[in-house]
Amino acid sequence: MYQTFKQFFNFCSSKNRKKFYLSIALGVLSALFGVLKVSAVGVMFDAVLKGEITNSAIFASFGIMLVTILGPSLINYRSTMLQTEAGYGTAADKRIEIAEHMRYLPMGYFNENSLGKITSVTTNTMENLSDVGTRVVMLVTGGIFLSGAICLMMFIFDWRIGILVVLGLLLFSFVNSRMQKASESCSKKKLESDSDVVERVLEYVKGIAEVKSYHLSGKYNKKLKKAIDENARANTALEFALVPFVAAQNFVAKMIGVSMVFFAILFYTNDTLSLFNCIMLLVCSFIMLEGLEKAGNYSALLRVVDLCVKQANEILNVPMMEIEGAEEKPSSFDIKAEHIDFSYGDKKIISDLTVQIPQNSTTAIVGPSGSGKTTLCHLLSRFWDVDKGEVILGTRNIKEYSMDSLMQNFSFVFQNVYLFKDTVANNIRFGRPSASMDEVILAARKARCHDFIMALPNGYDTVIGEGGGNLSGGEKQRISIARAIMKDAPIIILDEATANIDPENEEELLLAIGELTRRKTIIMIAHRLKTVQNADQILVMDKGRIIQKGTHSSLLREDGLYRRFINRREMAVNWKL
């Protein structure tokens, strides 16, 4: 239990940790008010036993009771506010920290870990921690402090009862530790099941078009239903695993109270305990039971808190790429890769590759699927770090630049464009958040998307659906190009940017790309002849190596993969029914 508390508080930021500590301190104060209730009862019983029920005794007892009611009410209000601020503040801070951390993780991390798992940690896990976890930690600590304060008071009234209570608390702690152990495996399965449900829901929703078109709704409904049923079973199993221990805890807590009552009366009848102390012990037994039940009933969920923290830390502990370095512009925008190797797991993707891309030139990369084209672009822009060799921008190894200053030199237009659920203007501003509206419109005009944007219901203020779902592929691509134009980076990487565009959009898209790439260093992955034939150099890749290099005309004179590639394309274009 102590380790769970320690891990939880270490997980919180110093600001939120201070709020939790203050809340706990207020909890101690609230527990002392709970002990003060005994004093109020003691004043009245003392007066009754002495036969001197005076107004002063009545007012003193009433005053103490009033303080024990008002005091905890005010304290608990402030304590609850602190818990709420710290709990939701911690969740918010960690979501941002995880997002910032993931910015600098190698792309391989996202290949190894599903979107569902990552999403679950930032949603379900953080929600559990901010809501359930925070309340659990505070209630358990409050119950512990109240029980501890009452236990100390026992020794004031009778040391024998005090020892009895200590033995009872040791037994209670033993049962609680067994409950923590029993909940460990079940809690882990519950959180894994939560992640699986999120993953299946995302998979089903993102693939709904394919599910419908291929009549897979039954199959995928079954997969989703299975995940939901497994989640229900995991939650039920957790409850069933804890019920016997919760019952045993409650039984021990009640037996501590019963034993206090029994021995207090026994010692009184044996004339070894005064009537006043006997009555005080009877009162204390009920308060002790309240504290133990509060601590015991919620402590079962501490394992969930522990696992939530561990899940978040699993992401935060993934080593980031080295992001520190020089905050400066390159001396030039020449790019050179020298004898670079890269493997994904045990699979070699790039092998001893050397290439030079001069500033303000256009380099086209072609080759069969799986030849390493996209990986090479990712290595040149440091989405991954090379295993061997070096990539140089200007005169420096790209690892010598800070990550943020390096990324300022690159703009990307991918085959699969992602647009955020925000206005069209803000999606374009993503390239430069401080841009004015006039600059947004100018970028949109250059990207040939101003006209269709103005045709939208609210023009530039139209909110795009998540992922750009309410726009066509060509429209999304042109907004993506407007975003890149807005950034105005000196190096442009086009990854199959025109691969899935219909003929009606292709001309506009090529004009937009022309605006984007003017006076830039361009690296493009493409299969269409018209997008590669004017390149200054064409790199032909196969199995992670550059097997041919040259211009379109020089490569056509060679008997190699490029010529065969072009011949097949021409045959496909000339084919008629």
Image: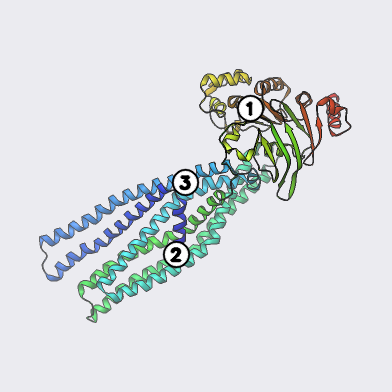
- What's the CA distance linking mark 2 and mark 3? 29 Å
For label 1, count other residues whose C-alpha is less than 10 Å away and answer few (under 14), some (14-19) or many (20+).
Answer: many
Nearer to us in this view, 238 or 171? 171
For label 3, count other residues whose C-alpha is less than 10 Å away and answer few (under 14), some (14-19) or many (20+).
Answer: many
- Reading the chain from its start, which is encountered first: label 3 or label 1? 3
Q: Which color mode does the image show?
A: rainbow
Identify the secondary structure beneath mark 1: loop
The quarter of the picture where the C terminus appears is top right
Q: Which mark is residue 91?
A: 3
The quarter of the picture where the N terminus appears is bottom left
In the drawing, does residue 129 fall left or right of residue 65?
Answer: right
Identify the secondary structure beneath mark 2: helix
Disc nearest the viewer among 3 and 1: 1
Identify the secondary structure beneath mark 3: helix
Nearer to us in this view, 336 or 230? 336
Q: Which residue is mark 1?
A: 490
Q: Which mark is residue 246?
A: 2
Check the image and name the residue furthest to the bottom: 270
Up/down of 356 relative to 435, above or below: below
- Reading the chain from its start, which is encountered first: label 1 or label 2? 2
Up/down of 347 relative to 449, above or below: below
Image position, residue 389 (x, y; %): 71, 43
- What's the CA distance linking mark 1 and mark 2? 65 Å
Disc nearest the viewer among 1 and 2: 1
Who's the residue at 69% across and 25% down the image? Answer: 360
The amino acid beneath tag 2 is Val
For the question of whether residue 301 can be seen, the reply is: no
For the question of whether residue 404 can be seen, the reply is: yes
In the drawing, does residue 129 fall left or right of residue 347?
Answer: left
The amino acid beneath tag 3 is Ala
Up/down of 537 relative to 224, above or below: above
The amino acid beneath tag 1 is Pro
